[in-house]
Image (spheres, helix red, strand yellow):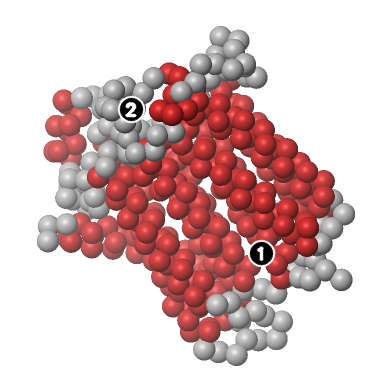
Amino acid sequence: MEQLLPLGQVAAIGAAVALGPLLWWRQRSRAGTPAGRLRALAVLTLFLTFDLIVFGAFTRLTDSGLGCPDWPGCYSAASPVGARHHIEAAQAALPSGPVTHGKAWIEMIHRYLASGVGLLILVMTVLAWRLGRQAPHAGEAAPSPWLATLTFAWVCVQGAFGALTVTMKLFPAIVTLHLLFGLGLLMLLAWQAEACRPRALAVPPGLRRAVAAVLLLTLVQVALGGWVSTNYAVLACDEFPTCHGGQWWPAMDFGQGFRLWRELGQRADGGWLGFEALAAIHMAHRLGAAVVFAALLALAWALRRHAPPWSRGLLAAAGWQLASGLSNVVLDWPIAAALAHTAGAAALLGLLTTLFARTLRATPS
């Protein structure tokens, strides 16, 4: 019962956060058709979800994930203001520890933003069901309300993983799943935005399958990147193109590195995770990056005749990811480069999802 009060308070703050975007959307789309208004809200929510993913990365990179070590509130308060005495005591006991006033605010702002996005998705779901009962306007698509319902269910699961991230003390598998569910939410919103307008991109069936394959490869690579980040293995290889000390193939322990169910920084038997395990995690992501980069270049080349803007977009996204990924290694993991890499991964997945959705709408002549 004690948890219900901060839960309601945090939800109320999230509703206040969502109020501004909702008012802006209502004003801008007032004259639009129902499908157009739904699409405008989907695009707005997509943009805010992208921002939330980047801010989530900032929360993790500043070691603020346990800035409030309980959930949904902060020491059972709705904000760090009400928890200031607990935070001061924790900070005095361990000044460089996970709980400080700054880290608590970062963590709670992330929760407020997540609550706001959840409310926007709830509004989208209600609108989608209302639209499903109406006849579509000329030239408009009638998106399935079940897609919006899936998106709402997805964000609820994402919230549950956010709670587990805190209560399970940054358990690597949970943190990685939390990131992946956030990116999956972004992809669902991109798909929903596309479902509201009848745009199509006619490509040969083989090219459509290539888009799907590259999207799947990118998802696997992003999962590897999440595993690198949650295990703090970015600097296990601090050189490029070699790994460490001029080694092209360092000593690696893939068994321990990819043992999924274990505590942060520990092996399955409770001992400390060795450098060889961290190097294995890093090298797996680095090798995967080479495969995905080559696949993106090949897809961009194949699209140059059918969809030149998409070809250029994929090249730009691939270049961004290459530059930001290398910057993390050679510049000793600066926070700006790490955020840029996360943002690039999210943008690339959104781009590929949108491209795939459009190719599915068309049958080549």
- Asked where in the image residue 276 lies, by quadrant, the reply is top left
Residue 192: where, in percent of width, then height?
Answer: 57, 68
Relative to 276, does residue 33 appear above or below in the rendering?
A: below
Residue 32: where, in percent of width, then height?
Answer: 61, 79
Task: Give the residue type that dot 2 points to.
Answer: Arg
Q: Nearer the viewer, residue 310 or 178?
A: 178
Q: Which residue is mark 1?
A: 357
Figure quadrant of the C terminus = bottom right
Figure quadrant of the N terminus = bottom left
- Can residue 44 be seen here? The reply is no
Give the class, few, some or many, for how many residues have Cα within 10 Å of label 1's Cα (few <14, many ≥20): many
Task: Report if the CB atoms under discs 1 and 2 are less than 8 Å apart.
Answer: no
Relative to 260, does residue 232 appear above or below in the rendering?
A: above
Residue 143: where, in percent of width, then height?
Answer: 58, 77
Q: Residue at x 49, y 58 (%)?
A: 185
Q: Earlier in the sequence, mark 1 or mark 2?
A: 2
Q: Residue furthest top?
A: 245
Q: Is residue 91 left or right of residue 171?
A: left
Residue 70: where, in percent of width, then height?
Answer: 22, 45
SS for tag 1? helix
- Asked where in the image residue 265 lies, by quadrant, the reply is top left
- Can residue 66 be seen here? The reply is yes
Q: Which residue is mark 2?
A: 267
Q: Nearer the viewer, residue 143 or 13?
A: 143
Q: Residue at x 56, y 44 (%)?
A: 220
Relative to 244, does residue 168 appear above or below in the rendering?
A: below
Task: Give the residue type that dot 1 points to.
Answer: Ala
Q: How many labels, in total?
A: 2
| Marks 1/2: CA–CA distance | 41 Å
Q: Is residue 335 left or right of residue 167?
A: right
Q: Nearer the viewer, residue 94 or 145?
A: 145
Q: Residue at x 42, y 67 (%)?
A: 152
